[in-house]
């Protein structure tokens, strides 16, 4: 493709970063996917975005699938292409979006991994009264109490936490802000951490949670501390920060059944994203059936 068309990609990525304020990681992913699309167009003899048709994009999806790319990744590639082509339409460089009706192969929807209530309780029993233990206790309690994403946690500032109102103000995907309740134990842990934060934080540090050098804690450090405390708790599995979010959503839905409420708390734009938490394990359903249904078979009760 001509250099002018790659310049259109650069302009789109700049639009994402400056106007839509998406993360640098997301911009990088868009660039990678659109570079793949450009290469495909060059190989297919598509000389400009105006020449791109729906059958080209269907072929692009098929080639991606044949190369071993997962349906989820193909969905992401096509979504990125549609967003870029919509941008070209808004800029007057294109009349119609050829990707509107192009869909990726269906992907099997897997259940999110979670910790049960007892496992989570063990994990949150963090001993010690030193500043690092106080910080870690506050981080882990808040992850589970409010279902935060890792990026949301590390971007928090002290002013985002209102202990009197028992809420935290979070800036999520797309720079959307939401207010989330904070549980009692998380409030206690946050109060302890805020009282001792100055022992660790650089005077100019604006982040709520800081590392040993006094600056904003990194996502990698949070991941490392979660693994550390999971090992201390003797949990026989891999534990990572997003597992707290999955567990928060699952436990809340099991208790309340309020799908819309959980959607709001998680900050999901589409309720279908939240619905994955409603799929209970069949063995659990069978156990409930056996215990509760009048006609269920009981062990030791043979039919005559």
Image: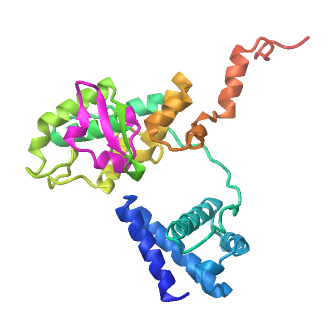
Report which quarter residue 82 is drawn in.
bottom right
Q: Is residue 162 magenta?
A: yes
* Residue 201 vertical position relative to residue 244 in the rendered view, above or below: below
Residue 263 x %, y %: 50, 36
Q: Which quadrant, please, contains the C terminus?
A: top right
Residues drawn in magenta = 144-171
Its colouring scheme is: rainbow
Q: Which quadrant, please, contains the N terminus?
A: bottom right
The front one of 141 and 58 is 58
Residue 229 x %, y %: 33, 42
Residue 25 x %, y %: 40, 63
**Residue extending furthest right?**
304
* Residue 97 vertical position relative to residue 185 in the rendered view, above or below: below
Report which quarter residue 143 is drawn in.
top left
Q: Is residue 130 visible?
A: yes
Judged left or right of residue 7, residue 101 is right
Residue 108 x %, y %: 68, 51
Q: Is residue 94 magenta?
A: no
Residue at image location 25% in from the left, 39% down from the top: 160
Judged left or right of residue 304, residue 201 is left
* Residue 188 vertical position relative to residue 207 in the rendered view, above or below: above
Residue at image location 10% in from the left, 42% down from the top: 198
The front one of 187 and 101 is 101
Residue at image location 40% in from the left, 66% down from the top: 15
């Amino acid at each position: 493709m001509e250099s002018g068309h790659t310049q259109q990609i650069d302009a789109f990525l700049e639009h994402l970063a400056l106007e839509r304020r998406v993360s640098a990681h997301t911009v990088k992913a868009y660039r990678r996917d659109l570079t793949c699309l450009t290469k495909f167009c060059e190989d297919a003899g598509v000389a400009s975005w105006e020449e791109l048709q729906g059958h080209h994009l269907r072929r692009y999806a098929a080639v991606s699938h044949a190369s071993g790319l997962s349906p989820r990744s193909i969905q992401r590639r096509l979504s990125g292409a549609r967003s870029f082509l919509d941008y070209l339409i808004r800029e007057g460089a294109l009349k119609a979006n050829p990707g509107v009706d192009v869909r990726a192969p269906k992907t099997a929807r897997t259940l999110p991994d979670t910790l049960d209530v007892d496992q989570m309780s063990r994990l949150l029993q963090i001993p010690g009264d030193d500043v690092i233990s106080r910080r870690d206790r506050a981080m882990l309690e808040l992850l589970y109490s409010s279902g935060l994403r890792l990026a949301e946690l590390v971007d928090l500032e002290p002013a985002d936490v209102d202990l009197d109102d028992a809420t935290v103000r979070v800036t999520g995907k797309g720079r959307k802000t939401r207010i989330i309740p904070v549980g009692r134990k998380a409030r206690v842990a946050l109060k302890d951490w805020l009282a001792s934060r100055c022992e660790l934080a650089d005077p100019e540090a604006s982040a709520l949670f800081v590392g040993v050098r006094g600056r904003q804690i990194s996502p990698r450090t949070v991941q490392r501390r979660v693994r550390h405390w999971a090992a201390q708790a003797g949990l026989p599995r891999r534990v990572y920060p997003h597992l707290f979010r999955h567990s928060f959503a699952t436990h809340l839905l099991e208790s309340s059944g309020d799908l819309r409420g959980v959607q709001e708390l998680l900050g999901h734009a589409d309720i279908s994203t939240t619905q994955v938490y409603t799929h209970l394990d069949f063995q659990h359903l069978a156990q409930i059936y056996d215990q509760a249904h009048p006609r269920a078979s009981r062990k030791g009760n043979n039919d005559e």
